[in-house]
Each structure stands twice: as structure tokens, then as C-alpha cells.
Image (cartoon, grey):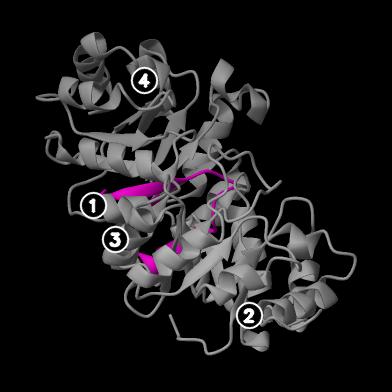
Amino acid sequence: MNPQKDPILCLITDLETPPVAMAERALKGGANMLQLRRKNASGRELCRLADALLPICRRAGALFIINDRLDVALATGADGVHLGQEDLPVGEARKLLGAGKIVGASTSSAAEALKAEREGADYVGFGHIFPTGSKTKGYPPLGPDAVDEAVRMLRIPLIAIGGITLENAHEPMRRGASGIAVISAVTKAEDPEEASRRLLAAMKGEAG
Amino acid sequence: MKATAATAAPLPRLVVISEGSGGNAIPETLRAMAGGPPCMVLIREKRLQGRELFSLAQKARREQLPAGSRLLVTERLDIAQAAGLDGVHLPEEACPLERLRAVAPKLLCGRSVHSTDTALEAEAAGADYLFFSPVYDTPSKRRYGPPQGTAALREACRAVTIPVYALGGITLERVAECMECGAWGIAAISLFSEPERLRSILETIHRTTG
């Protein structure tokens, strides 16, 4: 993964919002990474969305990552794939994608994050940090202090995820996270462009 | 008729498709094929997530299949490549075939079609073979509409030069009719779902298909 000096603001698509219009606005507001996540979409639909989103990301200088479906990432030339613990193992994805592309992994403990790093991940998603309404989790939030421990052990960037809002976005960042990933903080905002801009400011500890 | 792809051996005449119930029966099914005719085996387990599907594909790959057999998985080219399978079979709603072909030129790529028009499109896109369905009435294919019948099968087989497998409601008695329509072979789920009878059913059909 290209080491980004700027903090990473990753927007993950939700199921309710048309992703292309949403992505355009969020990227304009400064989001620099987009993850297409659509669990029940067909391969054809994912290809179609990826074909629409990739040029938008390229124009904005943002990374475009596909959740789970490495086949679609390969077919569409996306920048990489993001893998959950139930998806293809990180090491297998790395072998297929080669060194030039990005493999990210969802992790929920320092041990999982370290394992992903050893298997060749370029970054880890780490969470959920705060309580979240996005999906029912089987465990309580990790809390921002968990970021300290994981960051100390990792060499690759950690992107904090889960329940991140304008109010708490600074917490994982000041503990060493390289960025944050959000869904509803942008997709449910009245103005996704402005929400992205304010999130980036909040990550730096500046008043929104 | 062209019938070569990843390996030099012609495509098998018989396609065994998994039941979609999680794949636990697949290793047993593969072992039951030992000593029989070559088969194409399609791992079609849509409910499995990537890691489970990969693990199942690896297990299946480790089984010794009759010479000339091929092992495929539905849609997931990444899993086919990671597990060293021979190819992918694409439903109509899959990634466009030519896009996957560009990523993995040597992988066997087949496609499901339900009309002569889509058969021609799939051939033009570079498909190695087709499933034409549903030829006969079958509960698992009713969502694709009424059966196409053998006349439609014959038309599709005449229209393309790549192998066409008849799928949907295939029974032992119907194999000869499908072959007479110009099918390269037959594909089935339930006909092959009992491991203890599998070998004898495959051999019976193989005597008809040659």
C-alpha cells in the first residue's frame, strides 16, 4: 500500500445509498479510500459498480478496494481487496494479486491483526472501536485503548472502524491509527461531502 | 466440434453438479467416481463464504479423479486459482466471461444459458462450453421459467461450435434423446446425488454418450 502521509478516510458503501453518487460526494470532501461492500450483489452487479467507481476514485486520487470478492477485484482492475475473517485467507489473496495491489483484512484483536500482517496484509481494519449500529456484533466494542496495543505491535497501517463519528474520530487517531473507516457517518449524513471534510478535520483534532 | 481447454483431453461427457447443501458430500461423491468414466465436477455451493468454499475446493482437489476429469467451482475465479481447480462455471448473473478470461486465460470457463441467443453471445465471449437449461421440467430450475424442451436444445447445439451440456430434469432414459439433439453431454444434480449408486449411473450414461 502506498504509504499515505495524509490520514486515511475510508468510506465503505452501505446497502441503502446508490454508491456512485455517494462516492463522488465523499471523495470530493476528502475521503481517500473507497471500499465497495455489497454482500448479496451478483458478480455482474459488482463488476458494473466497480467499473463505475474505479474511474471516480482514480480521478480523486483515492484507492478503490472491493470487499470479499477477489475475483471481481481481479476482473475490474481495482486497487485491491478487503477480506473478512470468513473470506479467502489473506495469504492466498496476496499470491493471486501480486505485490502491486492492496490486501486489507478485518481484525478484532491485536493477535488477529498481527496474523494478517504476517500473512501479507497491507493494512488492517481494526474494530469495532465504539458501539455501532451497522451490524449486530457478537462482542462488545474494543474501545480506543485497544488501538494503542495493536499499533505498537504492527508495522502496517491500522484503520479504525466501528461507531466512529465526528465526536470520537480523534480518539483512534491520537492513539496511532493511520485512519478511520466509516459507513453511516458519511452515508447517513445530510451532506456527505461536508461530513467527509469535517471527519478529516476531526481526525486531526481540529474543531469541525 | 472443439472440446479442448486447459488440458489436451476432451471435455468429459458427464457433469456432476453438487447439491448446494454445504458440500459435505463432495469428497464422498468424488471417491465414488474412482475407476469410472471421466467427469466434470462442479462445486456449486452458493451459501458458503469464501474461506469455507476455498477449504472445500482444496479438499476436492486432493481427491484422485479419473483421467480427463475436470474440477470447477461456480463463479469464483479467485478460489479456482487459489485451490488449483481447472475452471469456473458462470451463472448468467456472474461477472462477464471475457473479463475473467482476461485474468486467467488458461482456466476453463463455462456459462449457463437459457436461449440460443445467449448461447451465441457466450460463445463469442470465449466460453469453453455451455450448460443449456432447463431442458426438461425440474423443481430446481422452475424459477428460470418453463422447460425449454428438446427442440430448443437442438437449436442451441446447432448454433454454436462449443460443447453444450443438457441440464435440467435429466434422467437415465432421457440421455439418448439429448445426445441425439447434438448435446456434447449431460449435466445433473439429483441424478448424481446418491454416492452409492453414482458409479453405476455414470457408467450406464457413459455407454450412451460414448
**Labels 2 and 3 touching (C-beta < 8 A):** no
* Residue A199 image position (x, y, % from top left): 73, 74
Tags 4 and 1 on a common chain: yes
Of tags 3 and 4, which is closer to the observer?
3
* Residue with the most extreme front position: A145
What is the CA distance from the residue labelled 1 to the residue labelled 2? Answer: 35 Å
- Is residue A114 in sight in this rendering? yes
**Which quarter of the picture shows residue B43?**
top left
The region drawn magenta spans B85-109
Of tags 2 and 4, which is closer to the observer?
2
The answer to whether residue B117 is left or right of residue B12 is right
Q: Residues within 10 Å of mark 1 (few under 14, many from 20)?
A: some
The label number, if any, that marks residue A99 in the structure image = none
Q: Which residue is mark 2?
A: A32
Of tags 4 and 1, which is closer to the observer?
1
Q: Which residue is mark 3?
A: A91
What is the CA distance from the residue labelled 2 to the residue labelled 3? Answer: 25 Å
Tags 3 and 1 on a common chain: no
The label number, if any, that marks residue B84 in the structure image = 1
| Amino acid type, mark 1 | Gly
Residue at image coords 36%, 67%: A121
* Residue A119 image position (x, y, % from top left): 28, 62
Mark 4 element type: helix
Q: Chain of mark 3?
A: A
| Amino acid type, mark 4 | Ala
Residue at image coords 37%, 20%: B175
**Labels 4 and 1 touching (C-beta < 8 A):** no
